[in-house]
């Protein structure tokens, strides 16, 4: 860059001030920790937590400003400076890495200890998949599946109620009782998906033993105008098609008001393994959301409403009556032909029909250094399960659950200095559950009240955060017979405490370490306390225990991320150890089988032990040449039942992923063109519970498998429209395999080759 | 600040006091799939009084353990045998046999005598496709002795059920609704 000084410096005072603000083009987030350089003066400065920077004592002249940030593309801007000036610069999101290393990158205001975020490309490559499938792109996140249609995320070996899912700022309260209950969220709502551990967990609860999943929509538009985006996808394996659209607008005539409308429709037919098609694995999903915002001076308010509606079929051949049935199914290599071969969109029994409604209002008042946020939310969740029953004409669900949650959160944030922030909040929630049909969990009413305090401090190298939270929860449960007779009443009270301490240190600008120690307490859920009945999927008789105590987890994690000077080689490693006392799990009681008309069923009892989950996630990235990137990911986890000196069941096996990607140079017509291929290898899970402690699993863990996946994508500019196309091939070699974490691995192989076509059309005005 | 706290507390009070917007759910229906009782009625073909033997689990799986009779029959006799399935936890008790007969093309009873008892089960009644259902059958007893008989009710879950004559009791096409082994005494 050449310095073109137009004015003789000696006639001017070198006392000009250049101020500015840096934000992310796509998410419109403030970018803290961005480096702003005046190239000609070799002066640089790092933006603060609000994304602001300031240079003083600058001579008038023409300069080049270079702005760089770890998760964005570097941008250069030419400016002419004759008087004090304020400049806003937007940085586009980084597009040419497979998974941006965002650990501890000071992005946004939340300086989180441990954060994994999906890159924009990962988000694009997973459009049309469900939430767990999308998140499993992150190292350390796995999926717990029931066939091809139901999957839920596992973070470092923990899932369901041990993970909090925060949907647009609201703690998701759905039905997460069983392994076959997937989160009720449309990933198309999200502009950003993150997995967070650390101090920020405490804003949402004291019970995030496994971590927090943040599903965050893009912020509403801040400038007048309108924009739309259309996404569509087609998957060959199950002839699944997806359409999703979003439209948002801020009117010039009413600049305080902004709104957004979003909707998704998705439908898939029966899925196919390499050798056979699985009957009744079709699915259908209809979702929409509406957002409206009003902003004036220090006051802003936002209303959000979303509706999620899904119906998923469960493979017909997985219905079993008793243990001999299960053993027969396990002994055969493939399902009987009566359960395979149909290629249809029709969903029969067994199936699940789930709706989730969320209405939320968020109001923010900024008063000097104080910021108050009031969040009110109502959630309704309905789940109907249709089993295979004798009467094939029946339209009645066998299980019909409805849960309503009303929550109020008031948060106060205080920035007295740029380096120091404090946050406190109080939260209250009320929940009610009702049911009809067979007994699974009781009806209950519960109240939760809690409060937290977090404070954060950072300078250019240190980043220290601490927080504490307390919650009180009471549950009143009962069973109701048809006609209203109430029996089996129970009353529970739980106090839970959470706290967290996080310290990050920048050894150099390219080498960062972070350590976190967190205490979390989780109160037992009603299913753990009070379930009592046959679990048809596994031919077991499960009972709860009303004497269970809250789980207490002490989680220590260490992160290390390093990049060489040229930025051509980077590594990131996370080490963690989660010691959980009173860990709730299901213990088989082989000496107490439950006799029924269909034979003896093994008894499983919810019980507590001391457990330890420890592991490592490792990622390395090498730019072999600038456009040619090799990335290696490895994750390992060991889960121990310390009281029995045994392994814990259903823990993810070690996984190794090797990927190569090539980014082509942009041309006039084609931009962001890339090709990538990866090989994901999952080892056999050899660390399974010993049968001497009671048989928990009727089939040994399946063998190791490797899958080849490939992706190619580009953006073509047609007139002013940048159309993004991509083709992805999953399981390209049509490998036959079964996964340890799929509940239907007793019965069927995993799905075969799936070619996925995607088209994205963003329209901006 | 005081104002904020007042506002917040009143909202909390409102939240706690909110009446539910749940559609009222009916509560626990008696598990329509539950079979509490299997009754076997034996009538000698040559005439005579009918004797019945039971498997009975009035509260369903779990809770109080089921009661099961020993089947005592005369040696060297032929009986017409009729199975009745009941859900006695329902009010009024439901006759599940009717449902099985109605969905006969998706159900099948199997009888497997074991041990030293010489019992032969024949003449099972058929569904509309001419394939056995076995709600009614004929039992012929041999010499005096003790043994067991295993009675299995298989349900075909797929649609169409694809029930075939050659299907074994452990066919992958069907699953067990009932699997009971009775002790048999031939006197």
Image (tube, coloured by chain):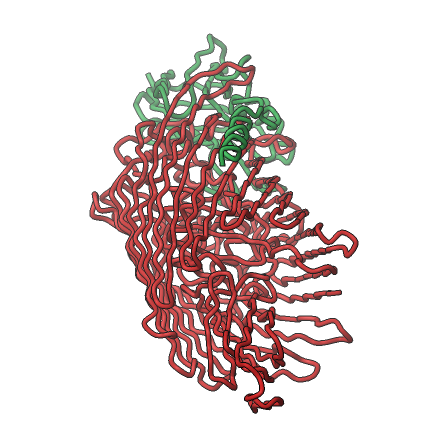
Location of residue B104 (image quadrant): top right
Spot the red chain and give its letter. Answer: A
Q: Chain B is shown in which shade?
A: green
Q: Is residue B88 visible?
A: yes
Q: Position of residue B21 (x, y in %)?
A: 61, 28
Whether A571 is drawn above or below A445: the answer is below
* Residue A322 position (above or below residue A10): above
Q: Judge from the rendering whether residue A691 lies leftward or rightward of residue A663; answer left or right.
A: left
In the picture provided, is A379 more to the left or to the right than A698? right
Q: Position of residue B99 (x, y in %)?
A: 59, 25
Q: Residue at x 39, y 60 (%)?
A: A140
Q: Tell me: A447 left or right of B68.
A: right
Q: Nearer the viewer, residue A457 or B142?
A: A457
Q: Nearer the viewer, residue A473 or A678?
A: A473
Residue found farthest to the top: B49
The x and y percentages for residue A238 are 62, 58
Depth order, front residue of A749/A104: A104
């Amino acid at each position: 860059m050449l310095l073109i000084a137009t004015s003789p410096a000696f006639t001017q005072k070198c006392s000009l001030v250049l101020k500015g603000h840096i934000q992310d083009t796509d998410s419109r987030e403030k970018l803290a920790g961005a480096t702003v350089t005046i190239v000609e003066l070799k002066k640089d400065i790092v933006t603060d937590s609000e994304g602001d920077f300031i240079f003083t004592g600058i001579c008038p002249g023409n300069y080049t400003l270079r702005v760089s940030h770890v998760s964005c593309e570097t941008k250069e801007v030419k400016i002419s400076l004759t008087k004090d000036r304020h400049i806003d610069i937007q940085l586009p999101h980084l597009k040419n890495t497979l998974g941006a290393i965002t650990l501890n990158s000071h992005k946004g205001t939340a300086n989180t200890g441990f954060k994994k975020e999906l890159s924009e490309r990962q988000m694009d490559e997973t459009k049309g998949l469900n939430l767990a499938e999308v998140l499993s792109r992150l190292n350390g996140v796995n999926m717990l599946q029931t066939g091809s249609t139901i999957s839920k995320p596992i973070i470092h070996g923990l899932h369901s109620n041990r993970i909090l899912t925060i949907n647009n700022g609201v703690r998701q309260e759905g039905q997460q009782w069983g392994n076959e209950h997937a989160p009720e969220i449309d990933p198309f709502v999200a502009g950003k998906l993150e997995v967070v551990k650390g101090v920020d967990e405490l804003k949402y609860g004291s019970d995030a033993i496994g971590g927090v999943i943040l599903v965050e929509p893009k912020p509403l538009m801040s400038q007048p105008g309108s924009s739309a985006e259309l996404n569509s996808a087609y998957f060959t394996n199950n002839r699944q098609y997806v359409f999703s659209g979003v439209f948002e607008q801020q009117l010039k005539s009413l600049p305080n008001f902004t709104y957004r409308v979003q909707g998704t429709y998705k439908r898939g037919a029966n899925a196919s393994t390499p050798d056979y098609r699985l009957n009744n694995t079709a699915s259908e999903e209809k979702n929409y959301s509406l957002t409206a915002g009003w902003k004036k001076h220090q006051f802003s308010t936002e209303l959000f409403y979303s509706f999620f509606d899904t119906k998923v079929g469960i493979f017909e051949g997985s219905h079993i009556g008793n243990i001999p049935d299960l053993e027969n199914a396990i002994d055969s290599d493939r399902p009987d032909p009566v359960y395979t071969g149909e290629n249809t969109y029709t969903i029969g029994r067994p199936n699940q029909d789930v709706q989730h409604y969320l209405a939320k209002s968020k109001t923010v008042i900024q008063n000097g250094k104080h910021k108050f946020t009031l969040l009110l939310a109502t959630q309704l969740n309905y789940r109907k399960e249709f089993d295979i029953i004798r009467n094939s004409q029946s339209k009645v669900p066998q299980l019909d659950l409805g849960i309503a949650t009303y929550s109020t959160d008031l948060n106060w944030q205080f920035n007295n200095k740029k380096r120091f922030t404090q946050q406190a909040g109080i939260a209250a929630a009320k929940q009610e559950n009702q049911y009809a049909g067979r007994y699974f969990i009781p009806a209950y009413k519960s109240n939760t009240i809690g409060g937290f305090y977090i404070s954060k401090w950072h300078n250019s190298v240190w980043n220290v955060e601490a927080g504490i939270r307390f919650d009180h929860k009471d549950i009143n449960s009962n069973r109701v017979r048809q006609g209203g007779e109430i029996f089996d009443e129970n009353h529970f009270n739980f106090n839970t405490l959470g706290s967290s301490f996080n310290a990050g240190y920048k050894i150099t600008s390219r080498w960062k370490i972070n350590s976190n120690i967190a205490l979390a307490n989780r109160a037992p859920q009603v299913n753990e306390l009070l379930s009592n009945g046959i679990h048809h999927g596994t031919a077991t008789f499960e009972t709860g225990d009303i004497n269970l105590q809250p789980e207490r987890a002490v989680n220590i994690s260490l992160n290390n991320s390093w990049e060489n000077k040229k930025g051509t080689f980077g590594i990131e490693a996370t080490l963690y150890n989660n010691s959980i006392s009173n860990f709730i799990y299901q213990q088989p009681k082989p000496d107490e089988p439950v006799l029924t008309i269909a034979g003896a069923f093994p008894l499983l009892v919810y019980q507590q032990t001391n457990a330890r989950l420890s592991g490592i996630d490792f990622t390395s990235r090498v730019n072999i040449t600038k456009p040619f990137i090799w990335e290696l990911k490895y994750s390992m986890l060991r889960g121990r039942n310390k009281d029995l000196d045994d392994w814990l069941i259903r823990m993810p096996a070690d996984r190794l992923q090797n990927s190569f990607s090539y980014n082509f140079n942009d041309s006039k017509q084609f931009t962001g063109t890339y090709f990538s291929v990866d090989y994901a290898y999952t080892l056999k899970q050899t660390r399974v519970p010993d049968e001497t402690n009671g048989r928990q699993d009727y089939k040994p863990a399946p063998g190791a498998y490797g899958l080849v996946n490939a992706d190619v994508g580009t953006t073509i500019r047609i007139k002013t429209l940048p159309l993004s196309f991509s083709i992805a091939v999953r399981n390209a070699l049509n490998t036959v395999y079964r996964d340890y974490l799929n509940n239907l691995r007793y019965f069927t192989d995993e799905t075969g080759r799936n070619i996925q076509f995607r088209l994205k059309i963003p329209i901006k005005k | 600040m005081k104002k904020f706290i007042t506002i917040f507390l009143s909202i909390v009070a409102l939240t706690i006091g909110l009446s539910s917007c749940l559609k009222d759910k009916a509560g626990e229906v008696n598990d329509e799939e539950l079979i509490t009782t299997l009754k076997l009625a034996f009538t000698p073909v040559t005439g005579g009084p009918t004797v019945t033997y039971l498997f009975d689990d009035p509260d369903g799986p779990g809770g109080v353990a089921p009661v099961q009779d020993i089947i005592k029959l005369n040696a060297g006799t032929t009986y017409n045998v009729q199975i009745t399935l009941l859900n006695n936890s329902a009010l009024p008790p439901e006759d599940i046999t009717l449902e099985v007969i109605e969905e006969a093309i998706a159900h099948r009873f199997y009888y497997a005598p074991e041990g030293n008892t010489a019992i032969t089960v024949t003449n099972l009644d058929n569904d509309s496709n001419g394939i056995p259902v076995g709600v009614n059958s004929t039992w012929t007893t041999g010499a005096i002795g003790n043994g067991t008989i295993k009675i299995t009710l298989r349900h075909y879950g797929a649609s169409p059920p694809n029930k075939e004559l050659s299907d074994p009791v452990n066919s992958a096409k069907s699953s067990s609704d009932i699997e009971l082994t009775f002790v048999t005494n031939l006197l």
